[in-house]
Image: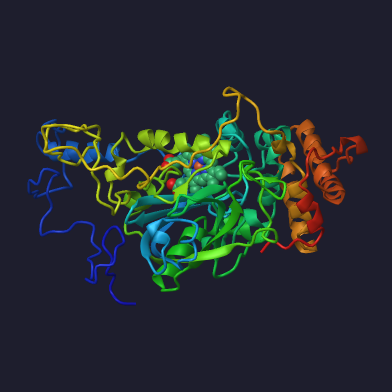
Amino acid sequence: RGPDTHSPTGQETGVPQKKVAQDGAYLTTAQGARLYDTDHSLKAGARGPVLLQDHHLREKITHFDHERIPERVVHARGAAAHGVFRAYGTASTVSKAAFLAKGVETPVFVRFSTVLGSRGSADTVRDTRGFATKFHTEEGVFDLVGNNIPVFFIQDAIKFPDVIHAGKPHPDREIPQAQSAHDTFWDFVTLHTEATHHTLWNMSDRGIPRSYRMMEGFGVHTFRLVDAEGGSTLVKFHWKPKLGVHSLVWEEAQITAGVDPDFHRRDLADAIEAGAFPQWELGIQTFPDTPEQNFTGIDLLDPTKIVPEELAPVQPIGLLTLNANPSNYFAETEQVAFHVGHLVPGIDVTNDPLLQGRLFSYLDTQLTRLGGPNFGQLPINRTHAPVNDMLRDGMHQTAVHRGVAPYRPNSLDGGCPFLAGEHTGAFVEVPAEVAASVKERKAPTSFDDHYSQPRLFWLSLTPTEREHIIAAYTFELGKCYEQAIKERALVVLANIDSELCAQVAAGLGLPVPPGEARLEDPAPSPALSQLGQTWPLD
Ligand code: HEM
């Protein structure tokens, strides 16, 4: 391996970079005053009290005292890498996004994460993994903020604080860290049965990936792509790892969590340093943008549902290669700020009520986490496109704005900033009809089917994969103190598959719930029932 030629933010410079903490011939204060000693505080005599006037002592300790920023409220533990996305051009028929045109190379920064654990928790716990990608396109930043599981626990963002409160450690004892093995988690997912599908994926081998390099990624929601003529197509985004999808077995995950809690971040950094650059193909499933936003009976606005790849194949649109490690964890991995609202022309959101809530949440939380409204100026977040906005001042402002008239039109600063034409630029909404009643706190009836897709997932698995799921439910539910929660979980399992329920009940030493606990599915999709017992996942 040759010398590292990447800049502190991971860009290739062609020039060997010094890996030293302090550059320069001598040590200074933050104000640049040269120091002759950094090991002894100023005292009244060698054995006397320390003097308040020792500026260097106060500066050094004060800065240290303020080194920590709040960890992310979710996805606190993560690892990241720089890379490049090369578009195949195959998406250009459905999206005018410049970075999707054939051969265009776009710098990216990708952060992988667990969801529930704190910053210092172990990597190999059973959990969903985040897969967030920041594309620094020439038209501005596009963030694809996805997970390694294609569905989500809830259908409406208003429940997000609730599901996270249930999944995080209990407020009294602050245990367990990053595990679903506790009462509040199972209480929530058995009372809010739309969580059944995501929970089943969590209990499957997908909940304990072998490596970040061997995970799929999913945009989860349906997005809307817009072409150069204004035509629109609904899509779901998929990342497919070139190394294939691999998982740990539970015993490996547990031992690894103790022996090497940094297993996943070490694996990612070591692979990249060794030149074994991980790659993923980005693909899309496409659906006609009809007013029903429904494909073969599957509601495309319901984030607890997938569209099987047999019904809508994933079409490859580009290749992601991760080729450089961050040089500073805090500056890059910790301070990066993703947002589902960071969109470029040609990519738009849909009315999925979970996605709509996320559009609010990310900026809001980052205002606290990153100390005010100017975190977009941090090197890792700064767009590579020219910025000409009318935002001013605020905490940690680093731009020195010129002129006196940050408004338009104005007659003082040489006219007004140029605006894109009516149908160009980002955030050009595709006109859509809105239902007659404006105020409605309810979900469409299609959101009531909570079991047909979990059942399909279960039926798609091999006997070994099913054994792993049975063992996972038995282990995790076995950690609950409340008997009633375990019994309710068995009712949920009975609604997925009677054998799954019976095996977990036996493992827990509990009776199988009576037959009437099995519900009728309110509205299973006809296309799904045709897929039968042999639906493969990959
Ligand atoms: C962070 C994915 C739903 C709020 C993240 C991150 C990912 C992610 C990957 C980590 C970003 C990073 O690495 O910095 C998802 C997915 C969701 C989902 C795929 C559903 C499909 C939600 C919802 C909300 C939410 C519904 C709130 C209403 C947050 C917050 C953070 C976060 C507050 C922390 C962001 C930060 O501090 O930078 N999410 N999320 N997420 N998510 Fe989500």
Q: Is residue 526 left or right of residue 403?
A: right
Instruction: Out of 134 and 229, give the one closest to the viewer.
Output: 229
Residue in the foreground of this view, choosing between 181 and 10: 10
Q: What residue do we see at 76% from left, 53% from top?
A: 527
Q: Position of residue 446 (x, y in %)?
A: 71, 38
Quadrant of the frame with the N terminus = bottom left
**Quadrant in which residue 468 is drawn:** bottom right
Tell which residue pokes out farthest to the right in this image.
515
Residue extending farthest top: 439
Q: Position of residue 211 (x, y in %)?
A: 55, 62
Any part of residue 522 in sight:
yes
Task: Decide which of 34, 279 is in the foreground and name it.
Answer: 279
Residue 519 in picture, x, y percent from top left: 84, 37
Q: Which quadrant holds residue 259?
A: bottom right
In the foreground, 318 or 330: 318
Residue at image coords 62%, 24%: 441
Quarter of the rendering occupied by the C terminus: bottom right
Is 111 situated above or below 33? below
Where residue 516 appears, x then y in whole percent?
91, 35
The number of discs equals: 0
Residue 172 quadrant: top right
The residue most toward the front is 229
**In this rendering, does residue 74 appear at all?**
no
Q: Residue at x 28, y 66 (%)?
A: 6
Left or right of 341 in this view: 509:
right
**What colour scheme has been applied to the protein in the rendered image?**
rainbow
